[in-house]
Amino acid sequence: MKQSRIWNVIMLFLATTSLFSCAQEQSKVYVESSLHDGWQFKQASKNEWKEAIVPGVVHMDLMRHGDIEDPFYRSNEKKVQWIEEEDWEYKTSFDVSEDLMNKDRIEIEFEGLDTYADVVINGIKVLSANNMFVRWNKDVKQYLKLGENEMKITFRSPINEVMDQYESTGFEYPADNDAHEKKLSVFTRKAPYHYGWDWGIRLVTSGIYRPITLKAWDEAKLVDVWVRQNHKEDRVELQHTIEVESFEDGQVQFVINSQDNSFESIQKTFDLKKGLNTLDLSFDIIDPELWWPNGFGEPHLYPVHYQLMSDNKILDELDRRIGLRTFEVINEPDSIGESFYMKVNGHPVFMKGTNYIPQDNLLPRVDSSRYEHLMNTAVASNMNMIRLWGGGIYENDYFYELADEKGLLLWQDFMFACTMYPGDEAFLENVKNEAVDNIRRLRNHPSLALWCGNNEIQMGWENWGWQESRNYSVQDSVLLYDYYTKLFKELLPQMVEEHDPGRFYYPSSPISNWGELEDFKYGDNHYWGVWWGKKPFESFREYIPRFMSEFGFQSFPEMRTIKKFATEEDWNIDSDVMKTHQKSSIGNITIKEYMDMYYREPKDFPSFVYLSQILQAEGMRMAFEAQRGAKPFCMGTLYWQLNDCWPVASWSGMDYYGNWKAMQYFVRDAFTPVLTTMEEKNGQLEVKIISDELADRSADLKLELYDFKGNQISTHSQKVEIPSNSSEVYWHKDVSDFLKGQDKKSVVLVAEVISEGKVLTKNTHYFVPVKDLKLKKSSSDIQIEQVDGGYDVTISSETLIKNLYLEIEGKGFWSDNYFDVVPGQLSKIRLETDKQLKSEDISSFSVVDTF
């Protein structure tokens, strides 16, 4: 079935298998084969054919043959821009057997053609593609012949293709992230970030970036199985809408089998008419196990197998995994302003998560291991939601399958961001096909939470001065907003209502602007007062919205990553290479300005890189704690951004190679189900405990004040009753009384919440900025013990170590890093590695080593 044979698609995408059957081997009713072998490519204006790899894109093939250097290295980005202005041709041949030719239907599915592509089979053009986000299916039996067949695909330059349209428009669209003097990206339904972004390289790719599959069948096939849920007191009714394409009138049986014996098999006979048939079938699951987001319970999935049968033959079949849950977005006027929060299975849930961008500019390079590492990072970081941002792509099926498995709710933007778009009939029809295809592909996933029309366009139109900066006439402005209305307030909500009714849709994120405090009472917000507004990190405690769907601060990737794209002569924030790998218009200077606020001047470039990560982590922790502490006024924090698409200085918590920055460790600790925070307000020190748990809990709150030599100055302990889903102050005291004359620059407060013998959360508080702390150099004592999969590492010190960073040569993952070591206390962490190590193989670095 063209959009739901999930595991077959995964096998094709990851293993490029040559041939397998989705039906019983002896029946040969339905067969599939991938068309990934024997491809060649060339520049259309030349005659030299070279080997190509499919799935792939032209930049990857050119690199493989040494025709271009790695665009990610140093400033090579500038050397490859010619590629986007050329046409490219790909060709292959494949055999068609007599058995295959005798099938009723033979179809080719292109899961992803990037972007303007003409497909020719045996000299006849069978398809013209114009949308990277759409799966293209074509009945090709009439174009095939027995034996060898040739397929050729010509990719037309996405730059040249729309140049006439650009030049005839009469005004320029405000696509500021398009790194070209002519803003052409808006005319093409292609990943916007390919054209450049304020964290992204410009690589305007072309190619067969997702699998191609040849499919053949007899009699009838499953086109789609759409499952809707009706939750009742002790059961869930599963309402199935089944689409079947039949080549003749007849009778079939539709069979539903539970692969884990959760329910008895269901079978129903249907009469089919020739053509497309829509069938309905419902059944109940009694005492259902619900699907819960990460941190709230198991994301239980029911494995279900569907079969379409006739005369004891399996005509078609597919597998699905169904997660039973309810999900609501509550966005309505209230006594404060306008709410924006989510309920899962009837419970209000604080959303902890992030914004996701595609993992590579060269998309076919993202294999299963990279998807798994990213999703495992989200789970380990205690997240329950990921926002798929509108300047990227609709991800492949494996991404959504992993989200289903791991309990990660997905906020799905449509692929529009940060500019106005055309609204002519041809453009709207193209978008309609894109929306329908992706809505139908994704709507069965329990991880899919909501649809959002675009990223920041409404806010940009109202607040970013586009009209004035581009001298739009009144007529231009009226036309552009009419286009906006047609696309985001009419077409897309109509498609959601028609194909995924009941799912929340809203036209644009955010709802409210970040300039005025009053705006923070309404809906979701993207707060950029920190970074773009140059406000101090402490403003995170004041500017708290009902739902924070975007905010962030930049850092550099670690030195090991920098060494992969730069030489030592480039190790300067003002070098051409570092500027190439910094796409924010205010980037490196802004990092330095904030660093000067909170830290001493670093002694060299590696120290600057390290401190940039600590700066980012500490500033963002302030935001996480403030937003979680403001519940239920605020009910979500999605930071910008989880990952990178190339090695770059950016807002990410995890760099291009999957290495956790300091912030990722801080995210994990700030997103624990139970969190304690400490904040000074008007001379008072407040200790707050925040719980996202669905049950009340009894615990002990323990506070210990130490000097930097490890002497305990004071201690406090009390029993606490922590209500479910709460945020409350449990202890407060005058700071002067609490410190008892101790030097603020030489003490640290450690807070723990302990329940049933387990430390639920641990946090530290300093009474002055880090640059004012009286830190002294100390050699940490590191002991290691080999265990399965790596080493237990125990660290101790005679004096305080601020933000200890541990590193080994080669691959390894630290269970914790960039953490504080309190003297007199042992810090025990796990290093996952397959290397044989001694203690001296571990290098360390801390704040005191930067000056």
Image: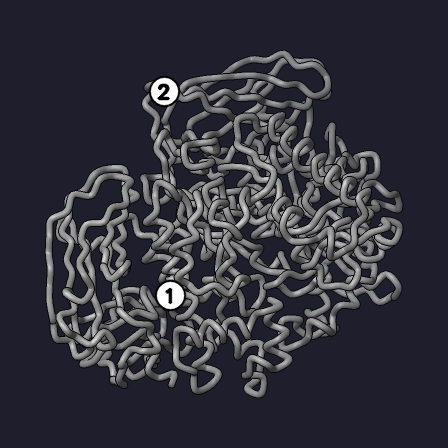
Q: Secondary structure at mark 1?
A: helix
**Residue 157 at x, y = what percent?**
81, 57
Residue at 58% over, 47% down: 395
Q: Nearer the viewer, residue 756 or 25?
A: 756
**Residue 684 at x, y = what percent?**
23, 59
The residue tagged 1 is 618
**Residue 611 at x, y = what percent?**
42, 75
- N-term-proximal mark, 1 vs 2: 2
**Relative horizontal placement of residue 386, taking residue 149 as reference (left or right):** left
Q: Nearer the viewer, residue 804 or 232?
A: 804
Q: Does residue 567 lie above or below 329 as drawn?
A: below
Q: Quadrant of the C terminus?
A: bottom left
**Relative horizontal placement of residue 434, taking residue 388 as reference (left or right):** right
Mark 2 residue type? Arg
**Residue 583 at x, y = what percent?**
61, 67
Using a 10 Å C-alpha cutoff, classify the residue at mark 1 as few (fewer than 14 neighbours), some (14 to 19) or many (20 or more): some
